[in-house]
Image (cartoon, rainbow, N blue to C red):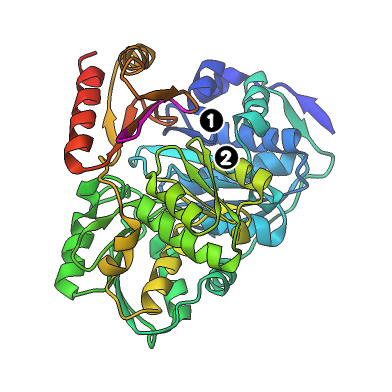
Amino acid sequence: MTSGTPDAAASPTLDPANLGAIFKAYDVRGTVPDQMDEALARATGNAFVQVLGAETVVIGYDMRPSSPGMARAFAEGASLAGAAVVNVGLASTDQLYFASGHLGHAGVMFTASHNPAQYNGMKMCRAGAQPVGVDTGLAEIRDVVGSGRIVTAEVPGEITETDVLAAYADHLLTLAPVVGRRLKVVVDAGNGMAGLTAPMVFDKIGTEAVEMVPLFFELDGTFPNHEANPIEPANLVDLQQAVLAEKADIGLAFDGDADRCFIVDEHGRGVSPSTLTALIAARELLKEPGAVVIHNLITSRSVPEIVTELGGRPVRTRVGHSYIKAEMAATDAIFGGEHSGHFYFRDFWRADSGMLAALHAMAALAETDRSLSDLLAEYERYPASGEINSTVADQAAVLADLRSHWSDVEGAEVDELDGLTVTHADWWFNVRASNTEPLLRLNCEGKDEATMVEVRDAVLTTIRSN
């Protein structure tokens, strides 16, 4: 192999200051073309092989206009470094994780998930869908890109294409088969990658078991109908209306890369991801009594309570897929759930899959004659604020103000595992900085609605007065 140092000034995206802004804790994310372009993707592909020593790299990409070109450039950079490249083409992020696990290769997914159309990004993993975060290789990849060091192999790696969509769907249905009464399901793909994956999965379930009503299945990275970010209530309105109009049993909403899923009950009511976490945890604990279940620190306190009541062992961790996956590996956890709508499965290489979470919800519903709202009632215990985002000029100053005030409240305990968490017997809240946007995120829960509202409003007053 030979090494060269190209002119970093050829693209401003290769400037170290820009790299510091877009290389996040567990992925790369930025706007196109000022922060991300094909030059960056090509250099990152080469650095990826240098740092990880990957002999083969599997690549997938979403429906954003810039994704195919950047995926192709990454492949060129990886091939130049001597790695073989397997391109699976248009894919959901969990489909890319499946390819990494199924084929046994390191991988990268080009997507900006739920971010608006002007964004793109890269989610990277080692073979077996093992995460690459800032502490597990991402910082080194950033630094190699910033140094301008390009490795050229004597023989470039071969670039090939393969299709794993059918195998992905088959694997999911071995983990959560939908059997029982026939369901009517509305699916809102938000013009994202569920528009590709849902038809294959539902076809394999069969029309005798499920009737699917599709919403916005056309792949369109400009998101002409609504943002593919189901954590925002406004983006669930179309699904809620369709569930009611169709008299459906359940509604499913996916984000842009379909690694997150939110559900809506038969009344058109959005279901908390914590409630779905508790349901899936109960199902997984039936497979392996006493197993560990991971929950992040903004998940409802009902989750660890229910896991404990069912004989499992709850383990709390910070927000973010690389942290969840690392804790799952350390504890051999069977399942992990995040309040953001990410759900992780040991049987899926500890990776997150919105579609697998959806299948668990559908399977649980099909196994009973109960409505979804009735089925989930036992898992809903505490009123919650949902995630409330605020743009602030000085995030650190706001967190310091909150800590100063709330640490003096009688009965309150403070920890800083991820942002600021204040816990009381009657309530808790967490405020943390976004890893991908200039925001502070608030999550709050109380023993009753009045308690939650009082704490929520008090915290928001501090956040928004700065």
| Residue located 78% across and 34% down the image | 152
Residue nearer the viewer, 186 or 295: 295
Q: Is 424 included in the stretch rendered in magenta?
A: yes
Q: Is 429 included in the stretch rendered in magenta?
A: no
Q: How many marks?
A: 2
Labels 1 and 2 touching (C-beta < 8 A)? yes
* Rendered location of residue 314, percent (x, y): 53, 47
| Residue located 65% across and 38% down the image | 45
Position of 336 relative to 149 (above/below) = below
Name the side, left or right, on which 382 lies relative to 71: left
* Rendered location of residue 381, percent (x, y): 30, 51
Position of 298 relative to 10 (above/below) = below
Which amino acid type corresponds to the residue marked 2 in the rendered image? Ser
Which amino acid type corresponds to the residue marked 1 in the rendered image? Ala
| Residue located 57% across and 36% down the image | 41
Q: Which mark is residue 322?
A: 2
* Rendered location of residue 169, percent (x, y): 53, 70
Residue 152 visible in the shown view? yes
Position of 251 relative to 420 (above/below) = below
| Residue located 56% across and 17% down the image | 16
Residue that mark 1 sits on: 25
Residue nearer the viewer, 223 or 347: 347
